[in-house]
Image (spheres, grey):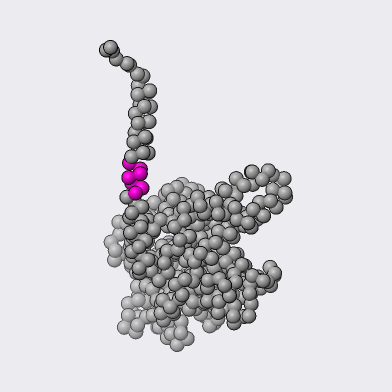
Amino acid sequence: MEGSITLPLWLFLLLLVAALWLLLEHLLLPVFRRYFRRRVVRVIAEVNTRLNIGIRPFQLTRKQALIDQLAFDDHVVAAMKEYAAENDMPKALVHEKVLRYANEIAPSFNAYVYFRFGYWLARSLGHMLYRVRVGLFDDGELSRVDPNASVVFVMNHRSNMDYLLVSFLVAEKAAISYAVGEWARIWPLQTLIKSMGAFFVRRNSRNALYRRVLERYVHHATRAGVCQAVFLEGGLTRDGLLRQPKLGFLDYMLRDYHPEIDRDIVFVPVGVNYDRVLEDVSLVRKLDPESAPRSTWFVIKTSFGFALKTLLMKREKRWFRFGYAAVNFGNPVSMTEYCQQQDIDLSTLDRDARFAHIDQLGHRLMDEISAVVPILPVALMCEVMLANQADWISELGAKTVAVARIGDLQARGAPIKVSASACEDVLTAALSMLEGRGLIESRDGLIRAKPEALDLLNYYANSIKHWKTGSSTCAES
């Protein structure tokens, strides 16, 4: 029997798409999955031989398993019942809400993405924009931390570059899991960030059910020994000052901590500073309540133009424009030792008593952070220009004042490393950066701060203001 069958074009295309999909689903995707799974296993085996803090099994747990663990956690189930009763909602709807929260929070860590792509990206961007400097002020204490402990890097927060900078600087020691805000919940950035082990946080949420799900995730991750990084101030500083510590994450980690039986939790203070913060203008602008909000189109256009202009610069010019980015690590604080010294068990205390101790710990950690925030040339020169803002001064006079300030800071043990031989060049470059950005003006060989640039000059000077009186104080939130 011979003949032909004629199909409409739309049906032929539909069958073709279906055939291609079946080919992809049942042949190509399984091959790719096996290939990448082998690569991931090799990466994990390789990095675990050189990391001070190995990749924990909790980090390798499938995302769906983490979601189920959170959704059926005893504390979460109790919170669901309470929420359903208070809001007169069916338990099934509350359970769906919890599943959405858990899906939003839980990461999907991929060791290959983290150590192959993420590390390369963070290192490339960091070195492309800045002269990166790192100082281990703990004299090797970080290397002596118990490898089975839960290590938490507690940091000040000056820029969104903090995530990248610290990640690649400690990549030889640990894989860090960050708490990131709503800014990162955009496609495709969201998928990349979650694959690097980060978890999303609604920082200003007052929803008790959501906070309970977040608390239990932090609790499980900490008990499993996942290396985490927390911005103790809660968000970016807008005026450059160190802020009061936010206690929520510390409470999540410590409210059920039993020093006698649980693995040690070790807080490592980290101080971060920049000669130029990429978001400085927008951060300072938010201090003015009368400033009009920027449109999304303006933000996209400005960001794209900035990125394109930066990529087209030669490396030397980029370094000259952005200067130094520096990170210092302080002395680790062991919670096992801390609880022994204070003779406390936080898990046995009521809420008020527990928060009193956590508040004390939070301020101690902020003091440790402030003690290691790097003192950079631009911040020093901003101090000098602000102190003489009403007068025209010579460059030599400004640098002389800065040199005296450096000597005083070094005598007090401040985290500043400027050799006498390099001091002249470093301070000259800092003044050139300020003049190039239009923050200072020159006339007849003299310089002074521009009146319209005082907010930005204060922003940078404030990063080291806690050394002005010798105290490590923080700004009120």
In percent of width and height, residue 299 lies at: 46, 51
Image quarter in which the C terminus is found: bottom right
The residue furthest bottom is: 411
Q: Does residue 34 appear in this view?
A: yes
Q: Point out the stretch of residues depicted in magenta.
A: 28-34
Task: Please name the residue shown 52% across and 80% down the image.
Answer: 468
Q: Answer whether residue 183 is magenta in the image.
A: no
In the picture, measured across the screen, residue 93 lies left or right of residue 29, that is right
Give the answer, above or below, for where 370 lies relative to 22: below
Give the answer, above or below, for where 180 lies relative to 3: below
Task: Please name the residue shown 54% across and 68% down the image.
Answer: 232
Predominant SS along the magenta part: helix
The residue furthest front is: 1
Q: Viewer-proximal residue, 461 or 241?
A: 241
In the picture, measured across the screen, residue 389 lies left or right of residue 12, that is right
In percent of width and height, residue 140 lies at: 41, 79
Give the answer, above or below, for where 259 lies relative to 180: below
Q: Answer whether residue 33 is magenta in the image.
A: yes
Image quarter in which the N terminus is found: top left
Q: Viewer-proximal residue, 453 or 346?
A: 346
Task: Please name the residue shown 64% across and 77% down the image.
Answer: 344
**Which of the 4 image quarters holds residue 400?**
bottom left
Task: Please name the residue shown 64% across and 43% down the image.
Answer: 92
In the picture, measured across the screen, residue 57 lies left or right of residue 1, that is right
In percent of width and height, residue 169 lies at: 38, 68
In percent of width and height, residue 51 lies at: 38, 69
